[in-house]
Amino acid sequence: MSKKYDVIVAGAGPAGLMAAQVLGEKGARVLLVDIKKDLPRVHRACCANLIIEPGTHREWVTCKDGAFHFAENRFSIPYSGAVIGLKRSVKVSAGGKTLTIAGKSPEGQVAVSYEKEALLQGMLARAAAQNNIEIMPETQALGVENTAGGVAVKLRSKGAEFTVQGSYAVAADGVNSHLVESLGLNKTRRTFLGRFMVASYHMEEVDCPYPESWITFMGKGHTLGGRGQIYMCPKPHGGATDKTVYELTVGVPALGGAAPSAKQEIDHFINTGKFASWFQHARIIDTRAAALNFLTPLVNPVEGTVAVVGDAAAFIETYVQGAIMYGYQAAHAIANQLATGAGLDAYARSWGNSFEYNDPEEIKRSTQGFGLHVLEDKDIDYLFGLTAGDDIHGFVNEFSDPLTVRTALFNHMTQIERERPVLAATLKRFSDVSVAEALQVNAQ
Ligand SMILES: Cc1cc2nc3c(=O)[nH]c(=O)nc-3n(C[C@H](O)[C@H](O)[C@H](O)COP(=O)(O)OP(=O)(O)OC[C@H]3O[C@@H](n4cnc5c(N)ncnc54)[C@H](O)[C@@H]3O)c2cc1C
């Protein structure tokens, strides 16, 4: 295959679809490839909540009148699916105590739950409507090379391997990117040597006592192995919200040996866990999974004529909205580069300035948000119990949530110091918790 494209986009997730669409609108000849057969189908676990806190990635994303609006970057994308406004974030201890954060947005929401498949369907339809975008499903990108004339991307489709040539490439193949690995860029990243395995169920007929809430289960007693993260939130399904579908997501560090898997943990949680009664009548209607490797973000997401966008460049995740935003920015930068011979560095600058995890301290701060898990269950019960009746406001956002929780708990510090001095001292030392400890990927 010798056809030369202006841009080859590997990965048709939110980042790749957005980049392909913008480049197509600018008149570029685009090849978009994805390993999946049914591109909008989501197999990878993703809670798909719109993070509406202003300032996230230096953006403010809202959902209104059938579109997601990006206020700072000044663009919108249509979204025709249903949404559920989440009014509160409820953290539930193993003993059933709660710390409740009410929504801080003008609508009183902490986040907005949407349907990722509906979003991707709309994005794919807009890309497919442009005849200068060629879409190849069931095609895996194996690697990319900068060449004298641009890029060569190695692909595998239906058992055959071949190389396509382009002027530029967009690596949008997600968190475990083959393209980033093939460029040797993972050698430039720090790894925390940990891996999280995630399992997720979509369920009907869940008896959840906290409607319209983002629920986080905190504490060792929720899991068999005493580690991990558990989230639950209501999801629109098939464009509707009349029948409440809950998405339950469990992530556990991959420790090997006899450590329980994510599947074992999620099954334990719904069948024999402390809140199994919520799931007595539940019916599983969809399952998803993911593997997360913890590598620091790419300092420079542009390597020669390859722009790395979305999770492919990130520590864990850019969020769906971040993937869309960076896809949009990278596409504009490439379009400028194609038109004028300059401009690609604008994307690299924006990435450097806006992606929070580029600041190593932010990785520490936000992973410490998970770090309440290092406390004993009785301590979390006690601390959450203190917050009953408190008026706490905030958002679902890994960058601000740790501070919201910390502030809520520290408001009770005088009482904690009096009643539980050892716990008070532990809380005050919380900023000493290492990233590996907070992620629970350290051996015990
Ligand atoms: C447990 C969990 C919960 C999350 N919750 C939220 C949330 O509430 N809100 C939010 O905004 N974000 C959330 N995220 C993050 C979100 O899923 C990602 O940030 C986002 O999907 C990244 O988009 P992307 O396009 O960069 O990558 P992806 O969505 O991963 O898309 C990558 C695409 O590339 C394709 N691909 C992969 N490898 C290849 C290859 N070699 N060749 C060809 N194609 C390939 C894949 O099939 C896929 O279509 C969550 C993630 C996880 C794991």
Image (tube, rainbow, N blue to C red):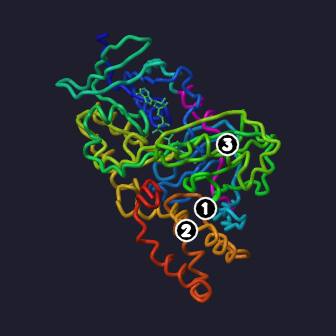
Q: Secondary structure at mark 1?
A: loop
Residue visible at 72% across and 74% down in the picture: 388
Residue visible at 55% across and 85% down in the picture: 421
Q: CA distance from mark 2 to mark 3?
A: 24 Å
| Comes first in the chain, label 1 or label 2 | 1
Quadrant in the picture for the C terminus: bottom left
Residue 97, percent across and down? 71, 67
Residue ID for mark 1: 219
Q: Nearer the viewer, residue 394 or 218?
A: 218
Q: CA distance from mark 1 to mark 3?
A: 17 Å
Amino acid type, callout 3:
Asp
Amino acid type, callout 1:
Gly
| Comes first in the chain, label 2 or label 3 | 3
Q: CA distance from mark 1 to mark 2?
A: 7 Å
Q: Quadrant of residue 379?
A: bottom right
Q: Nearer the viewer, residue 417 or 232?
A: 417
Specify the segment rendered in magenta: 108-126
Q: Nearer the viewer, residue 305 or 338?
A: 305
Residue 282, percent across and down? 78, 41
Tell me: 374 left or right of 132.
right
Residue 182, percent across and down? 28, 31
The answer to whether residue 200 is magenta is no
Residue ID for mark 2: 375
Amino acid type, callout 2:
Leu
Q: Quadrant of residue 146?
A: top left
Residue 250, percent across and down? 60, 47
Quadrant in the picture for the N terminus: top left
Residue ID for mark 3: 267
Tell me: 399 left or right of 360.
right
Tell me: 182 left or right of 116.
left
Q: Residues within 10 Å of mark 3 (few under 14, many from 20)?
A: some
Q: Which mark is residue 184?
A: none
